[in-house]
Structure formats: structure tokens, C-alpha cells
Amino acid sequence: MAREDTPILIVGAGPTGLTLAATLLSAGIPFHIIDKRLEQGGLPRAINVSAKTLEILDNLECLTAELVKNSIQLKALSIYFEGRRLFDIQGKQLSKKFPYIFHVTQPIIEQVLEKKLLCSNITIERGTELISLHEVDHKVFATLKTNTGKEYQQTFQHVIGCDGGQSTVKKLLNIEEEAEQYNAYFLLADVILEENISTRTLKYFLTEQGYIILAPLPNSKIRIIASFRGNFPGLEKLNINKYFLEKLIQKRSFQKFHIKEINWLTGAPYYHRILTSASSKNTFLAGDALHQFSPVGGTNMNVGIADAYDLGTRLISFYQDSNQENNLKEYSKERLAVARKNLEITRWSTLLMTRLEGASAWDKYFLPSLKNRKFYKNFIPRLFSGDLLNDSINFNQTLETLC
Ligand SMILES: Cc1cc2nc3c(=O)[nH]c(=O)nc-3n(C[C@H](O)[C@H](O)[C@H](O)COP(=O)(O)OP(=O)(O)OC[C@H]3O[C@@H](n4cnc5c(N)ncnc54)[C@H](O)[C@@H]3O)c2cc1C
């Protein structure tokens, strides 16, 4: 298809851009999708896939046998405080249709979505970078650069920035951003243990010093995520090895494991950032380009995929019926409301779980009492399932009435 006949340019082929592409493809709306990288990113990154994301993948016919084969489905999430089991959330409390906690690594999701495009002969234009854009009337003029250094300009009706946390689209549009760095950081290690660990339960061990999560992955791996207060000194300075991780597990979970192999190690400060608008005339932003939340709860990719699906369905309506322009314009306001609520929830969970909030705030919510029974039974499962995001309730007010 000639570029001039193509109304939409998707910048970035991560999970957000690929979901948008698959959504447009489902209604036959033409688009181009570019990525400056020559290959798909291979790092495991996201593992937690919400029921809402599974529903979207299912709608796009991307909940394939390959995806399921490479996943692990956990029955429950158990939460401990100083070694004492506080409560369990069963998968069936999170979703009726997908009654489990679903873990699969991000590259598998990207592969499945890319294969969906390939089945319709749509390829990602790799090694192509958006370097500038300007909007005139109902058109967006984009300057693209190939990996051989060739620059050219093309015109589109809509450009969608799905280009991640360092988004060029965001910078070019000059949209204001709000950001906060918390006084804490996390370490994340994908490991293989010597011992067999229950692969049916995700475990959160909360302590006065911070938390450690043991998250089963496919192929007998475990993801360890731990929080620490203070500034992130950088991975090199921390000099992490398997003995450090073994001691940390024991200190926070009161359980003893031996690590056979560390497959991947990373760490970063907790922070969040969110733009004040998700669009400008005919250019839109979605996924990490629009927002990055604290990683607690593993929501970043999931909210990005939901942004893409939402925007995709609005673009389909618009291209099928130009009277739907208002619906497209509402994207920014409506998705930012969802993102803001997720920011509130992840910020609250992070402050509590890293113990930045102080003990009294903690006890009120988490030590089971008669007063907070509803909080445990109804609110916490809805918080983990992502259900609260589309609910009009005020998060902070509801919390106060339940605890
Ligand atoms: C260690 C770790 C663990 C995580 N765990 C979870 C989890 O369990 N659950 C969860 O929901 N999220 C998780 N996340 C977050 C998740 O990885 C991101 O939210 C997700 O990758 C965002 O997808 P995206 O498509 O918006 O952006 P990206 O994945 O960053 O993709 C953006 C793409 O745009 C391309 N690009 C950038 N600029 C340009 C340009 N100018 N022109 C062309 N192409 C461009 C890039 O090459 C890239 O391929 C985790 C992240 C990390 C680092």
C-alpha cells in the first residue's frame, strides 16, 4: 500500500503499538507501523498479564496456543506480613472468564501480535525512526529516517506515539508532564532455584524493611522483586550475587531457598510520570509514552494495551463514520482519567509496601480487624484485578470508609 493512501502512522512496535495495529487490522483500517529498532526487544520485562489484557488479546484472536503454552497460570496470590500469612486472593475473585493470575514474558506477547500482522502481510518497518512532526489543519507531516541515514517526509491524517518512556512524539508535541520519584528503589532478578517451589501461587512477603515478591514464571524460573528505601545507587555498586538474594529471601520470607542460576538482574528507583494531555490535534499518545507508573502490581504494559485498544476502536469508528470525531477527541480525557486512577492506586500501594508511609498507616489497612473486612473481601481483589480503574468511585475516599 502506498504511504499516501495510508491515513495512520503508528510510531513504536512495543506491546502498545502492536495492539493498536492488530485492532485497526481487525476492521481493515490501513496503517503503517515503524520502529527504530532493527529487532524486537528480547528482555523479559513485563510478566503480569491482567484479565482485561487477556480479554483484549482474545478479541483480537491473539490468545493463541503459542501464548498459552509459554505462560503459567497461578491459582492464587498469598500475602504475608513479617512471615505471617494475612490473606489469599483466589484467581476466581479476579475474573470469571480468566480465573487465574497469568504470567508470560513480554516478548511472547509481542511475537504473537506481530504474527497476527504478518498473517495479513503487514510488516513492521524496522530501522525507521520518527524524528520530527508538525501538524497543519487536518494533516500531520512526519519526518522519518531510515537506519541508512535517509530522511523523508510523509503526510498522515493521524500519528500515534506508542514510542515508550523516552517518546520522541511526546517531546515533539511539548506536552507538560507531572513526575515524582519516591525515596525507594527495587531490584528484580529472574532466577532458577535448586529447590522446587510451589508454582501455583504468587507470594508477596511484606516486612517492616520492605517487601519481597516470589513470582513463578514458565520453565521453572522465579522472578524475585524486592524493595529498598533510599536512593538507587546503581546495579554495579550493589554488587548483587546469588548469596545476597538467598539471604534477602530468608530475611523477608522466613523461607530458605538456594539459587542455581541468575538469568537476568535489573533495578531502578520507583517513580511515576504522566502527561497532562494524551493528544494534540491529530496526534495521540498511548502506553509508556503517555504514562509510567510505579511497577508495583505490574500494571504499566496492561494499561498501555488497554489505551491502544480503546484508541483503536475510536479510530475505527471515526474512519467508518466521520461523525464520530468527538468520540475520538474524548480519548485524551477518558484515558487520562483511567491513567490517573491507576497512578493513585500504584502510588498508594508503593508507599505502603516499601514502608515509606510509616507503620500506623500500614496497620490500619493490612492487619485484619473487624473494621476492614470489606476492604479485604471486596476491595483488595478489585484493586488487583484492575476493576477499579473503570469504576467511578473515588479511590482515597472509599479506602477511608472501608478501614
Ligand atoms: C523489569 C520490568 C518489568 C516489568 N513488568 C511489568 C509487568 O509485569 N506488567 C506490566 O504491565 N508492565 C511491566 N513492565 C512495563 C512494560 O515493560 C512497559 O509498560 C511496556 O514495554 C510499554 O510498552 P510500550 O509499547 O508502550 O513501549 P515500549 O515497549 O518501550 O516500546 C516502544 C517502542 O517504540 C520504539 N521507538 C521509540 N522511539 C521511536 C521513534 N522515534 N521512532 C520509531 N520507533 C521508536 C522503541 O524502539 C520501542 O520498540 C515492566 C518493565 C520492566 C522494565
Image (spheres, helix red, strand yellow):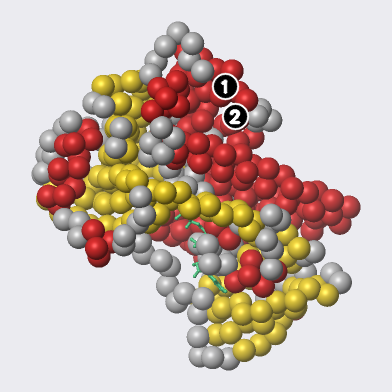
Disc 1 target residue: 400
Horizontal arrangement in the rendering, residue 294 relative to residue 287 (left or right): left
Disc 2 target residue: 396
Location of residue 309 in the rendering, given as x and y in whole percent from the top left corner: 63, 50
Location of residue 260 in the rendering, given as x and y in whole percent from the top left corner: 12, 50
Q: Amino acid at mark 1?
A: Glu
The 10 Å Cα crowd at callout 2, few under 14, some 14 to 19, many 20 or more, is few
- In the image, is residue 225 above or below residue 367? below
The 10 Å Cα crowd at callout 1, few under 14, some 14 to 19, many 20 or more, is few
Location of residue 401 in the rendering, given as x and y in whole percent from the top left corner: 59, 18
Q: Amino acid at mark 2?
A: Asn
Q: State the residue at coordinates (29%, 32%).
A: 207
Q: State the residue at coordinates (57%, 39%).
A: 344
Location of residue 235 in the rendering, given as x and y in whole percent from the top left corner: 28, 61
Horizontal arrangement in the rendering, residue 14 relative to residue 335 (left or right): left
Give the structural element (helix, strand or loop) at label 1: helix
Q: State the residue at coordinates (44%, 35%).
A: 357
- Which quadrant of the structure image shows residue 89? top left
Horizontal arrangement in the rendering, residue 23 relative to residue 164 (left or right): right
Label 1 C-beta lies within 8 Å of the nearest ligand 1 atom:
no
Q: Are marks 1 and 2 in contact (CB under 8 Å)?
A: yes
Q: Residue furthest top?
A: 370
Numbered tag placed on residue 4 in the rendering: none
Q: Quadrant of the N terminus?
A: bottom right
Q: State the residue at coordinates (50%, 85%).
A: 147
